[in-house]
Image (cartoon, rainbow, N blue to C red):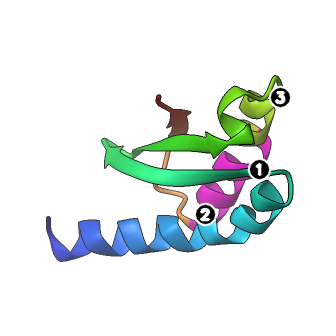
Amino acid sequence: MSKSEKNIFKEVEKALDEVRPFLKADGGGVELVDIVDNVVKVRLTGSCSDCNISMQTLKNGIETSIKNTIPLITKVIAIN
């Protein structure tokens, strides 16, 4: 992994740290899995993994936070 890739991972983690308290308050969480071609792959955990509004949380909370921090990121997807 190059230095710039490590920096992007660190920046994404910082963005995730901003939304984690809100997820945790509802019994959920998020883990960074990978970044491929400017697409961030995350895993929703806890109550977020099977919540009926988790895709809204993913797009409106997690993706927005990441894209605001790192405009290079084009999309955030959840994987199992």
The local secondary structure at tag 2 comes to helix
Where, quadrant-wise, is the N terminus in this rendering? bottom left
Q: CA distance from mark 2 to mark 1?
A: 9 Å
Residues at badges 3 and 1 in contact (C-beta under 8 Å)? no
Q: CA distance from mark 3 to mark 1?
A: 11 Å
Q: Is residue 6 left or right of residue 63?
A: left
Q: Is residue 61 above or below residue 13?
A: above
The local secondary structure at tag 1 comes to helix
Magenta highlight on residue 70: no
Q: Which quadrant would residue 76 be assigned to in this image?
A: top right
Q: Residues within 10 Å of mark 2 (few under 14, many from 20)?
A: many
- Between disc 3 and disc 1, whose residue precedes? 3
Residue sitting at x 66%, y 44%: 46
Q: Residue furthest left?
A: 1
Residue sitting at x 77%, y 40%: 57
- Which residue position is annotated with label 1? 61
- Between disc 2 and disc 3, whose residue precedes? 2
Q: Is residue 8 above or below residue 57?
A: below
Boundaries of the magenta span: 60-69
What secondary structure is the stretch in magenta mostly built from?
helix
The local secondary structure at tag 3 comes to loop
Q: Nearer the viewer, residue 67 or 35?
A: 35
Q: Is residue 15 above or below residue 32?
A: below
Amino acid type of the residue tagged 3 in the rendering: Ile
Amino acid type of the residue tagged 2 in the rendering: Leu
Residue sitting at x 34%, y 75%: 7
Q: Which quadrant would residue 67 be assigned to in this image?
A: bottom right
Amino acid type of the residue tagged 1 in the rendering: Gly
- Which residue position is annotated with label 2? 16
- Which residue position is annotated with label 3? 53
